[in-house]
């Protein structure tokens, strides 16, 4: 008993390390806390401290603003379409790459991952140049295509990890019993990868919903919610409403991220691996 207690005490982190960890958490979340606090501020002039009063007035005014609702609806539509494309392409890529070995496999895998690792400004400039070469003007669909390029990897990483855990004998048994490829996918493969596919889709939706840099290059006259927020920085009298919208975005994007974490919990040893 004494030895167990000693081992337990030895495994505890020193106080200075705990202090650094808590300090890092405060540093990361302090700006978010300030936005949440000032969303309830009674004063129209933003960021006066201490807070003189609390109100829900700005939430009601934000809900009544047509430009905000239009931006929210546009962001939801873009994220939904980009996620749908990413789920189809990411699943197909994972199915093609997870088991077969062929020339160029590593290069294709790298090409799938590159869009999420590149700086957004590089991706945005590249997409804009490609659209101009094809004669496409920035529009709703160019935003969707731009977002889908980096959302695919979110689905691919989750699905390919689940494929590696699925016994291939299930697929072989289904084919031996006479099922064709579509029936095997619908009745054998899809139930096995469903949660990973859903988690990848949720992450892709959250990533697309608050994407700003790539959207700036591909949106043209379209105004998604992140672009609306960026434009609001030049209007200090609208700061309380801007804080409300920013707070709502954080809450909305937090929900799918938590759902994805719950669905992928326990797959840390394989999720995200490209080998």
Image: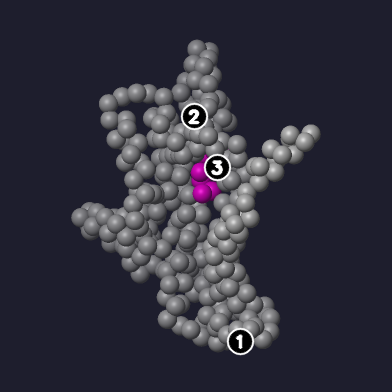
Q: Which residue is mark 3?
A: 198
As displayed, is residue 42 above or below residue 7? below
Say left or right for 149 vs 267.
Answer: left
Label number found at residue 43: 1
Question: In 3D space, how far apart are the residues under numbered discs 1 and 2 (Cα atoms)?
Answer: 54 Å
Residue 109, position as x, y percentages in the image: 35, 36
Residue 231, position as x, y percentages in the image: 42, 75
Q: Which residue is mark 2?
A: 163
Earlier in the chain: of badge 2 and badge 3, it is 2
Please give the name of the residue rendered at 69% of the width and 81% of the height, measured from the top-left corner.
54
Is there CB contact under 8 Å for labels 1 and 3?
A: no
Residue 77, position as x, y percentages in the image: 48, 58
Q: Secondary structure at mark 2?
A: helix
Please give the name of the residue rendered at 62% of the width and 44% of the height, measured from the top-left corner.
262
Say left or right for 60 vs 242.
Answer: right
Instruction: Say if the magenta span includes residue 136.
Output: no
Disc 2: CA contacts within 10 A as few (<14), some (14-19) or many (>=20): many
In the picture, which quadrant includes the N terminus? Answer: top right
Q: Which residues are magenta?
A: 195-203
Label number found at residue 8: none
In the picture, which quadrant includes the C terminus? Answer: top left
Task: For marks 1 and 2, give the one nearer the viewer.
Answer: 1
Task: For marks 1 and 3, give the one nearer the viewer.
Answer: 1
Q: Secondary structure at mark 3?
A: helix
Where residue 48 sits, quadrant-wise, is: bottom right
Viewer-side residue, 57 vs 48: 48
Residue 37, position as x, y percentages in the image: 62, 74
Earlier in the chain: of badge 1 and badge 2, it is 1
User: Is any part of residue 32 visible from this angle?
Assistant: no
């Amino acid at each position: 008993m004494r030895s167990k207690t000693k081992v337990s005490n030895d495994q505890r982190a020193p106080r200075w390390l705990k202090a650094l960890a808590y300090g890092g958490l405060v540093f990361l979340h302090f700006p978010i806390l300030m936005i949440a606090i000032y969303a309830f501020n009674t004063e129209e002039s933003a960021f006066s401290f201490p807070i003189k009063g609390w109100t829900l007035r700005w939430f009601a005014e934000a809900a009544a603003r047509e430009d905000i609702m239009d931006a929210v609806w546009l962001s939801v539509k873009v994220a939904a379409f980009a996620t749908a494309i990413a789920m189809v392409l990411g699943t197909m890529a994972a199915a093609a790459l997870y088991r077969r070995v062929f020339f160029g496999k590593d290069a294709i895998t790298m090409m799938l991952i590159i869009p999420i690792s590149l700086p957004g400004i590089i991706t945005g400039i590249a997409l804009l140049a490609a659209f101009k070469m094809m004669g496409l003007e920035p529009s709703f669909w160019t935003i969707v295509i731009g977002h889908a390029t980096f959302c695919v990897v979110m689905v691919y990483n989750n699905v390919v990890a689940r494929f590696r855990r699925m016994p291939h004998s299930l697929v072989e048994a289904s084919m031996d019993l006479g099922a064709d490829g579509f029936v095997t996918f619908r009745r054998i493969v899809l139930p096995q990868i469903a949660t990973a596919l859903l988690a990848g889709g949720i992450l892709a939706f959250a990533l697309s919903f608050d994407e700003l840099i790539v959207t700036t290059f591909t949106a043209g006259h379209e105004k998604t919610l992140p672009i609306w927020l960026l434009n609001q920085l030049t209007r200090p009298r609208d700061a309380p409403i801007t804080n409300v919208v920013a707070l709502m975005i954080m809450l909305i994007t937090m929900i799918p991220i938590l759902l994805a974490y719950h669905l992928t919990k326990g797959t840390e040893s394989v999720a995200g691996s490209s080998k």
